[in-house]
Image: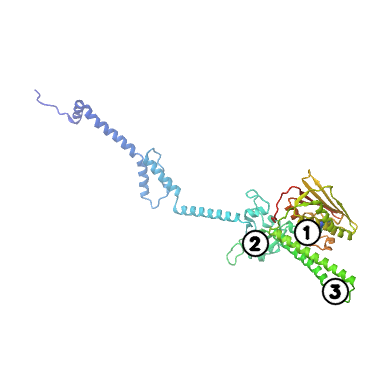
Amino acid sequence: MVLGVPERGVWGIFRAAAERAPVAFWLPVALIVVGIVVLKRTLRPLVPIEQQLERLATRLTVSPADLEPVRLPAPAAVGWNRLVEALRHGGQPEERESRLAQALEGYRQKKSDQVLNSLLDGVAVTDGQGRITFANKALLGLLGRRPGEDSVCGQTMFDCLGLAPGGQAVQPLKDPSLEGRPVIVEYQRGGQIEDGVLRIVRTPLAAEPGQSARGHVWCVRDVTQQKLADQMREQFVNAATHELRTPLANIKAYSETLALGDMVDVEQQKAFCNTIDEEVTRLANFVDDLLHLSRMQVGSTCLNRQTTDMERLFREVVGKVSQQMKQQQITFEVELPGKLPELLVDKEKFTVAVVNLLGNAAKYTPEGGRIRLGVELREGDETLQIDVEDTGIGIAPQELPKIFDRFFRSTDPRVGRTSGSGLGLALTQEIVRLHGGKVTVESELNKGSRFTILLPTRTEGATCSGV
Ligand code: ADP
């Protein structure tokens, strides 16, 4: 009989419960312990975050530098760290704005560099001391420098362009009183136009009113071709005026004398009529040459090729010029091969080409000289070589490269004394080119010249002018 049961207390109750139902007791206990551990692990990263937030709560301004990343492998820490990173990267609003402004400025600079580099004119910018701070690709090209490799920055435009500081043409660029105004000069790089002509425009960079220029923008254009064209036009006008005026004056004088009738006898009348006829022929030839030339310029000169007996063609050519040779007491030698093939050529134009060469030989060979027309088949009958050789005044070496240019006439006074428009050789060259051939020249001053036409015997080459 149990009279009294000792009191167990809480611990006793636990033990009794653990003994009677161990699973039912220990399972909830184990779950509570595991829960506490998991909770602690989850909340651990929040502690430093919370501490930082508490610190910030008392500050007036928040700077990204006040925030520290949390080095723990928890999603909350990862999120916090990204926040800190974003704030640090983004920086302060003013910082962001200045960075944006810098980026915009860089973009604008790049764009304007691109635009300036795409210009065909050379452009440079110089500072207050006249030193180059920018030069576009076209300017480097004009100076024969490679973009990106040969920098001209820091040099002056005078050094760069090789402008002789003492030269008359560049004086306006040296004049301090013109620093604040646009200046345009044309500078010839050598003794001749062919050496190059530059048009230089210098404009002051916008400065505050009353202040001196902060620098200049330079625009440099190569106007050599334009100058050469101007020179040619001038030469043409001179030649044309001379070519037209002389025969017209002669025709007028002789026809006026003839009109007097009784004053001149029959013999004289015949002589005058012959002179008028010659002058008219000269005028007609000149106009023909001009017509051919203008056709070539618009690209409408086409060949009318026909099967041509070349031997007959050369005989006709000889017939056309031998009278002139005789008059000048020039020994004219003709060497034709025994048999010449029939070729597909524009008979009329090809005759003009050969007659031009022979006519020049006669024109530029003094009395008593010698001219030779030699024709032969070369390279296994593939090429017909036509040589026109003379013992005349010859051509100076520096003029040789120009003699096929339109309107070119030598500066030799002996050439100036003869009439001519400077169109003959240009026409000859064009006609031969249309036939697929070429004309070359060798000459020695005061000894004589040799012009050679090389004509392919097979039909090839352009048939219409592309000039
Ligand atoms: P033009 O004879 O009417 O002046 P061309 O075009 O036929 O024009 O010739 C151009 C220039 O070439 C001549 O002005 C002359 O200076 C030079 N030339 C041409 N042929 C000869 C030659 N056989 N001997 C010397 N100079 C020549």
Q: Is residue 336 left or right of residue 123?
A: right
Label 3 packing within 10 angstroms: few (<14), some (14-19), many (20+): some
Q: What kind of residue is marked 1?
A: Gly
Q: What kind of residue is marked 2?
A: Arg
* Inter-mark Cα distance, 3 to 2: 64 Å
At mark 1, the secondary structure is helix
Q: How many marks?
A: 3
- Residue at mark 2: 202
Locate ligand 1 by image quadrant: bottom right
Mark 3 or 1, nearer chain start:
3
Which quarter of the figure is the C terminus placed in? bottom right
Residue 97 image position (x, y, % from top left)? 47, 54
- The answer to whether the residue bearing label 1 lies less than 8 angstroms from the nearest atom of ligand 1 is yes
**In the image shown, does 152 or 291 lie closer to the viewer?**
291
Answer yes or no: is residue 443 visible. no
The residue located at (87%, 71%) in the rendering is 269
**In the image shown, does 345 or 432 lie closer to the viewer?**
345
Residue 160 image position (x, y, % from top left)? 68, 55
Q: Which mark is residue 273?
A: none
Residue 421 vertical position relative to residue 449 in the rendered view, above or below:
below
- Residue at mark 1: 424
Residue 439 image position (x, y, % from top left)? 77, 52
Mark 1 or 2, nearer chain start:
2
Answer yes or no: is residue 35 visible. yes
- The answer to whether the residue bearing label 3 lies less than 8 angstroms from the nearest atom of ligand 1 is no
Q: Which mark is residue 258?
A: 3
- The answer to whether the residue bearing label 2 lies less than 8 angstroms from the nearest atom of ligand 1 is no
**In the image shown, does 200 or 434 lie closer to the viewer?**
434
Residue 25 vertical position relative to residue 225 in the rendered view, above or below:
above
